[in-house]
Amino acid sequence: MLEAVGLNTEIVLVLIILFFTMVLFLINTVRVDVVSILVLVALGVCRLLPSEQLFSGFSSDAVISLIGIMIISAGLEKTGISGRVARWMLQFGGESPRKILILLMAAAAVSASFMRSVGTVALFMPIVNRINVRTGITKSFLILPMAFCAIIGGMLTMVGSASLIVLNSLIDNAARYYDNPELIHYAPFKLFSVFPVGVALLIAGMVYLYFVAPRLSNEKKQRSLNGSTKAHFKKFYGKDGDIFEVRVPEKSSLAGGTIKNLELKLGSSLSIIAMIQDNETQFPPLRGTTIKPNALLALMGSKEQITEFAKKYDLKVLPKLKAFAESLHPARAGLSEAVIPPSSQFVGTEARELHMRRNHRLHVLALCRGDTVIQGDELTTTVLRPGDTLGMYSTWEALNDFQKNPDFFVLTTSYPREKTFPSKIPYAIFFFFLAIALVVFGGFSISIGLFMGAVGMIATGVLSIDQAYEKVSWKTVFFLAGMIPLGRVMQTSGTAEWLSDYLIPDQIMLPPIVVQGFLAVVTNLASLVLSNIGATVFMVPVAMDIALNIGADPRIFALTAALASASTFMSQSNQINALIIGPGGYSSKTLFRIGSGMTVIYLSTMLGVLSALY
């Protein structure tokens, strides 16, 4: 048992730095990476660490592993795997909310085990949107369970959560300053060391979320992200932005006609956006295309106008978008505007000479000139002038290509611009599994394996080097690199030992499981203030000292602190909760109510499994 140490100048300085760090985290007026840099400066000025150790966090295994996993995650996302995952879920889950919920939670957890929870939630949000459009299942029913399972999924491996990524570095730092020779030789946790604990946590979490998810369906529904754009088009162009899926039966007089003839019948209030026939999607359809029987049309207009038009021409209006649900989803397509600049070579030519559909995959719905809106057949013969504004509908990919054209000035800027490259999926998957194999079977450290995988993705063009730099969250890197030296100085100064004696005095004899439970609760509460990384850095050294004082295993107590710090389900300030609260329409009360229950189940399961296994 270690002897208690009294306060000295170094401990007082470290406590002061810890206090101000906690205050800055709590008031949340200074960015966490800036706080971390201030901590580095304070440690250096107070001479609590030598210069060669002060900046060692930037070259630590934890930081290198974090950079590697961020690049690998970005590479997987870049290939468009999310769309394939959504189709897989709909294929196996059908339209059953319960089946889709289970598949979504499991897929998010598995993904988060290597992609980190924040990246996984960002990746799965478009998947939830697609499921919502295709099935009508409310997003509030799916988003929170998916996000919570992504947090838990980070506990399946040592690279899924920032708390676990930094754990080995903290244990190594602590071991160097203990007199116990056995502790120095403790092996670091391997990639799948926490897998049994993570599986138990995931099963318990999925069972809990399975039963509470129906209560979330009544949460306030969120307005479509492009609602303001639709209102703008309604006001200035007289175009209703709602789209309906319509089938052309054989008996319809439109069957056998052309898109041009259809547009003449649609008039100025309705527009055709896309067509599917012979298993081919035309978006937008060319005017000379013949409409075959049983073709599917995507028509834009108000429900009343579409219903009246369908009745007149014997068309069948489907209850919701199904065949067009993915291609016309707001994440992939929408309304936009472009202006004809004075320098455009098309000034003085007729609008039909632009050939927007054929050359640019854009459908011009109307032209706005001052207070005048020109549309329908009149639009094709209108001579273009500088300042004419074109109201268009297209995929975001087509608009992104179009904005590079110097003859037009695209006004719409807030749209998804990221392209996906499905052809790179084999490379991304290969280097993803190569990184895992190098760690599991090759005997390489986690940092080397992940960095090899990241370099492989860059070398094969899954990501360019510039894109790799952009995808690294340097804010998180600096935050982590600054916190690691703080954890080290807690050991070298004796602060961790002093705090452990303060929390669990020697004269109080408690069973190890009780002390471990107390540690888990304190760490969880600390994570609500310090963030999961901050709480891990702060509590792991303390946890190891407590374990040594009571004769328990310091590595398991350190793991307890790291796992407990990641269970930030209740706090709205948590990155993931902040990401989902808007799209899911959750109130703070709902987040706290569901999150507190999840926290109790998580901590109870964690303590039970750790006690049983270790």
Image (spheres, rainbow, N blue to C red):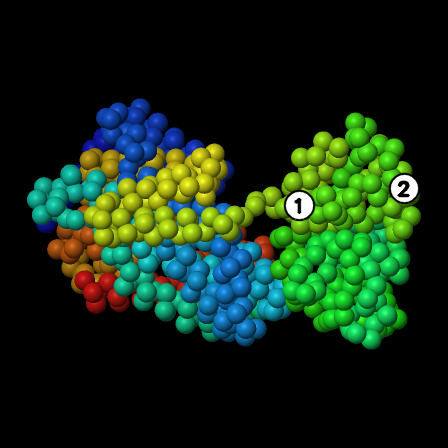
Which of the labelled discs sits on residue 398, or is there none? 1
Q: Earlier in the sequence, mark 1 or mark 2?
A: 2
Q: Quadrant of residue 278?
A: bottom right
Image point 26% across, 66% down: which residue?
A: 609
Name the kind of residue labelled 2 in the image.
Answer: Thr
- Position of residue 598 in the picture relative to residue 156 (left or right): right
Q: List x then y, in percent, for residue 341.
A: 79, 31
Say which of 53 and 541 sits in front.
Answer: 53
Question: 197 above or below 396?
Answer: below
Cα distance between the residues tagged 1 and 2: 24 Å
**Which quarter of the figure has residue 7?**
top left
Q: Residues within 10 Å of mark 2 (few under 14, many from 20)?
A: some
Residue sitting at x 76%, y 39%: 338
Q: Where is residue 120? Give x, y as percent.
A: 45, 54
Q: Nearer the viewer, residue 48 or 122?
A: 122
Is residue 17 in view from this perspective?
no
Q: Residue at x 18, y 62 (%)?
A: 614
Which of these two is toward me, 93 or 34?
Answer: 93
Residue at the spot of label 2: 382
Amino acid type assigned to the residue bearing label 1 in the image:
Ala
Q: Pick whichever, 5 or 303, lies toward us.
A: 303
